[in-house]
Structures are given as structure tokens and as C-alpha cells.
Image (tube, grey):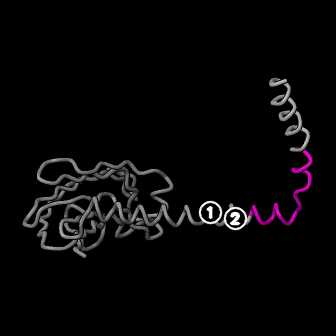
């Protein structure tokens, strides 16, 4: 008798479950779908907030340092790669894809590095390789002294401009 009661309850549950699922109306399904979409939106918003908090934690504003790369005259050269050193330590090395070049030729700016450094003077060495509009290959390098003060520091490196000097690099502090 004891074995029959659980079996009977299981059969009763199996029989009643499909009936309750069939009773769900289109309005209830639509309401559930809206709730799922609201939850997805909340998750996306929370993820964005979490990423902002993570950046603030990892890169506090008093020691934050970022480097951006742009092209001064996009028609004059096709950028292949950029290497950035700080105090003779490689910070970043990047090979450019066709899409990245296309974006930069339309005026885009690439954030190539974000990190933390102490206040004071720091020596940056930037090297790049590119192909000139005439077809010749170019490999250039230049150094720049970054004067890091209290607060965030941002440096833009413009490659290949008329004011860029003999090495084809122009530096701009933001």
C-alpha cells in the first residue's frame, strides 16, 4: 500500500502537468517574454556599470595613463604596426587589420594602452612600420618625455603628419 501512494501521486502529477501547460494563454507568454527582456536589459546595464567600476579600481585617476594612436594624414601611408616602450619596457605592440586601418583612415583614434604610472618624467619610445603612398616601406622611431602629474594623463600619437618632424610622429598631451 505504501508503494502505491507515491506511484499514484506521480501518475496524477504527470497527467495534470500537460493540462496546466495547455492552459497558459498568449497574454501570459507575452508577459513572460517582456519580463525576460527586462531582465536582459538590467543585466546589460549592470555589466556596463561593473566594467566602469572595474576600470576605476584598476586604473585610479591619480595614476592613470593612456596612449592613443591616430593618423595625421591617412592618404599618405598605410600603418602596419606600432610598438610602445616605457622606460625600455614594451607596453604595447599592435599589428593593424584592414578594418582597423579603414577606421583610422576615416579619422578614428585607437586606444592602444591603459595603465598606471607614478608621477614624474617618463621616457616613451614609439616605433612604427608603414607603407608610404609611393609604395616604399617606412620604419621609424622617436622618443617622448611624458611629464606625469597628479591626475590622469593621456597622450595622443599622430603618425605621419606635416608637423610630425623627421620621424613622422607628433605627440599631444590631453
Residue at 28 percent across and 68 percent down: it is 156
Residue at 7 percent across and 65 percent down: it is 121
Q: Is residue 45 above or below residue 126?
A: below
Quadrant in which the C terminus appears: bottom left
Residue 138 shows up from this direction:
no
Specify the farthest residue to the left. 120
**For this view, does 121 lie left or right of residue 76?**
left
**For this view, does 77 lie left or right of residue 33?**
left
Label 2 environment density (alpha carbons within 10 Å; few <14, some 14–19, many ≥20): few
Which image quadrant is residue 14 in? Answer: top right
Q: Is 120 included in the stretch rendered in magenta?
A: no
Say which of 7 and 80 sits in front.
7
Say which of 150 and 78 sits in front.
150
Q: Which residue is mark 2?
A: 35
Residue at 30 percent across and 52 percent down: it is 82
Residue 141 shows up from this direction:
yes
Q: Which residue is mark 1?
A: 39
Label 1 environment density (alpha carbons within 10 Å; few <14, some 14–19, many ≥20): few
Give the mark count.
2
Q: Main secondary structure of the magenta part?
A: helix
Q: Are marks 1 and 2 in contact (CB under 8 Å)?
A: yes
Residue range in magenta is: 18-33
In the rendered image, residue 94, in percent from the top left (x then y), is placed at 34, 49
Q: Is residue 20 above or below residue 57?
A: above
Residue at 55 percent across and 61 percent down: it is 43
Q: Is residue 12 above or below residue 168?
A: above
**For this view, does 8 lie left or right of residue 145?**
right
In the rendered image, residue 2, in percent from the top left (x then y), is placed at 80, 25
Which image quadrant is residue 72 in? Answer: bottom left
- Describe the element under mark 2 as helix, strand or loop: helix
Q: Is 28 included in the stretch rendered in magenta?
A: yes
Amino acid at each position: 500500500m505504501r508503494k502505491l501512494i507515491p506511484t499514484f501521486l506521480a501518475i496524477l502529477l504527470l497527467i495534470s502537468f500537460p493540462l496546466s501547460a495547455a492552459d497558459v494563454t498568449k497574454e501570459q507568454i507575452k508577459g513572460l517574454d517582456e519580463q525576460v527582456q527586462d531582465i536582459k536589459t538590467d543585466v546589460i546595464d549592470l555589466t556596463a556599470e561593473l566594467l566602469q567600476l572595474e576600470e576605476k579600481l584598476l586604473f585610479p585617476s591619480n595614476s592613470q595613463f593612456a596612449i592613443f594612436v591616430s593618423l595625421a594624414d591617412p592618404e599618405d601611408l598605410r600603418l602596419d604596426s606600432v610598438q610602445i616602450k616605457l622606460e625600455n619596457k614594451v607596453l604595447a605592440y599592435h599589428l593593424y587589420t584592414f578594418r582597423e586601418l579603414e577606421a583610422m583612415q576615416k579619422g578614428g583614434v585607437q586606444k592602444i594602452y591603459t595603465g598606471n604610472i607614478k608621477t614624474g618624467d617618463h621616457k616613451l619610445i614609439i616605433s612604427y612600420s608603414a607603407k608610404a603612398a609611393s609604395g616604399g616601406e617606412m620604419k621609424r622611431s622617436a622618443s617622448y618625455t611624458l611629464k606625469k602629474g597628479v591626475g590622469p594623463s593621456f597622450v595622443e600619437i599622430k603618425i605621419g603628419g606635416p608637423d610630425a618632424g623627421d620621424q613622422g610622429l607628433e605627440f599631444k598631451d590631453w
